[in-house]
């Protein structure tokens, strides 16, 4: 089916509608009567093509004669390596501001250039990204972080001024964030399945580790209560803005906090077993792996934890590292039973 409606078809637009629903409180039956349905504006293939976002996204394939049908010059742009909006770029970005982010994403992933008028329209309309719901921004962020080109995409968003407007709490510090996202891209290439909490946590690793250094400076003992409060203050705005689930927020907070318990090589097997049983430990391990790749954690410490976890999975055991997933076996040494002296009558 083909539509002629100019509304943006791509993305989880249904989320925005659900977010703006209001609870009905009017007792008047007439006021609560359903609105008449607006019929779809069906159109021709050419009309359907012209309502889309970019020329390279508006090509049709005819299965009858195996030909590509191009109404908007998409083949020429595809061959030239150009991302160009269909029609007026200002109108296209006003219809759906997320298209600005996608234009840059496609350019990075495909190695294409942004057409001059399209690039200028992004600069003129970038403030419109503030009107996009947190749910849609959440979707775009995680799709890009899992694309294998996260470092380049986020850098492009930042250069265009979109990242800071869309994700003001995440922060982009240039080379530091680029190294961490580069490590994410390497993990994606190696088929690592990153949790949402790990991907968001990558943006907070430098700041969190800086807080840990501040609270444990001059050899003072780390104040866990103060650290947890600072961590909450650091993460709460992002969790709310991106509409992160309570579970993801829990994994993110506890995953970062657990890094303080992994700051040194494990000394006892029981320590490894206890931590590895926690639901947030996979996130902590992924965050430590990213931090080690970016030079934020000593490689020997990360290597020691890796070896301990390998032994845990293999099921061997020794005095240094308990490597079973179960509780350590009870000691075979007989314990002397303490007896109370009989009370004399």
Image (tube, grey):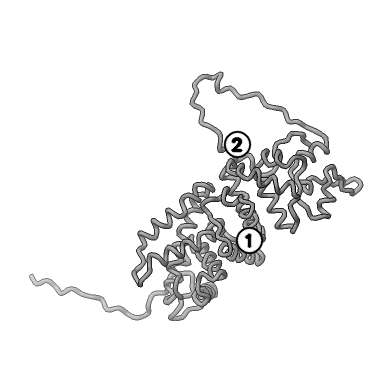
Horizontal side of residue 8 vs 206, given as left or right: right
Instruction: Name the residue located 39 percent from the left edge and 75 percent from the top edge.
Output: 330
Residue 257 pos. (x, y %): 44, 62
- Quadrant location, the C terminus: bottom left
In terms of depth relative to the viewer, which is nearer, 312 or 22? 22
Residue 132 pos. (x, y %): 59, 42
Q: Dot 2, crowdedness within 10 Å: few (<14), some or many (≥20)?
A: few
Residue 332, quarter of picture: bottom left
In terms of depth relative to the viewer, which is nearer, 210 or 245? 210
- Image height of 204 relative to 122, above or below: below
Instruction: Name the residue located 75 percent from the left edge and 45 percent from the top edge.
Output: 85
Q: Which residue is mark 2?
A: 17
Residue 15, quarter of picture: top right
Q: Which SS class for mark 1? A: helix
Instruction: Name the residue located 61 percent from the left edge and 54 percent from the top edge.
Output: 158
Horizontal side of residue 130 vs 73, given as left or right: left
Q: Which SS class for mark 2? A: helix
Residue 5 pos. (x, y %): 74, 34
* Residue 177 seen from this side: yes
* Residue 315 seen from this side: no
Horizontal side of residue 190 vs 253, given as left or right: right
- Image height of 27 relative to 142, above or below: above
Instruction: Name the residue located 79 percent from the left edge and 39 percent from the top edge.
Output: 50
Q: Which residue is mark 1?
A: 151
């Amino acid at each position: 089916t083909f539509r002629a409606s100019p509304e943006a078809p791509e993305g989880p637009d249904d989320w925005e509608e659900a977010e703006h629903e209001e609870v009905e409180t009017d007792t008047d039956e007439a006021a609560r009567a359903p609105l008449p349905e607006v019929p779809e504006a069906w159109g021709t293939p050419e009309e359907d093509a012209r309502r889309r976002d970019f020329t390279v996204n508006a090509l049709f394939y005819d299965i009858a004669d195996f030909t590509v049908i191009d109404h908007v010059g998409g083949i020429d742009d595809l061959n030239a390596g150009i991302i160009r909006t269909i029609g007026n770029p200002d109108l296209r970005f006003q219809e759906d501001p997320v298209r600005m982010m996608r234009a840059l994403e496609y350019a990075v992933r495909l190695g294409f250039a942004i057409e001059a008028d399209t690039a200028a329209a992004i600069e003129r309309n970038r403030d419109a990204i503030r009107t996009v719901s947190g749910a849609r921004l959440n979707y775009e962020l995680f799709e890009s972080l899992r694309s294998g080109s996260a470092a380049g995409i986020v850098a492009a968003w930042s250069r265009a001024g979109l990242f800071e407007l869309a994700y003001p709490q995440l922060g982009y510090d240039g080379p530091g964030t680029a190294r961490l996202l580069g490590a994410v891209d390497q993990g994606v290439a190696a088929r690592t399945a990153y949790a949402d909490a790990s991907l968001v946590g990558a943006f907070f690793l430098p700041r969190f580790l800086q807080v840990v250094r501040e609270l444990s400076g001059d050899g003072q003992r780390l104040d866990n209560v103060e650290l947890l409060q600072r961590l909450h203050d650091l993460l709460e705005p992002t969790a709310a803005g991106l509409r992160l689930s309570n579970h993801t927020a829990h994994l993110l907070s506890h995953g970062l906090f657990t890094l303080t318990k992994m700051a040194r090589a494990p000394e006892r097997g029981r320590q490894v077993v206890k931590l590895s049983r926690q639901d947030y430990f996979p996130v902590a391990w992924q965050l430590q792996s990213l931090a080690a790749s970016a030079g934020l954690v000593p490689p020997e410490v990360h290597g020691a934890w890796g070896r301990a976890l390998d032994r845990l999975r293999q099921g061997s055991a020794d005095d240094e590292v308990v490597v079973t997933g179960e509780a350590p076996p009870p000691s075979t040494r007989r314990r002397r039973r303490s007896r109370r002296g009989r009370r004399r009558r």
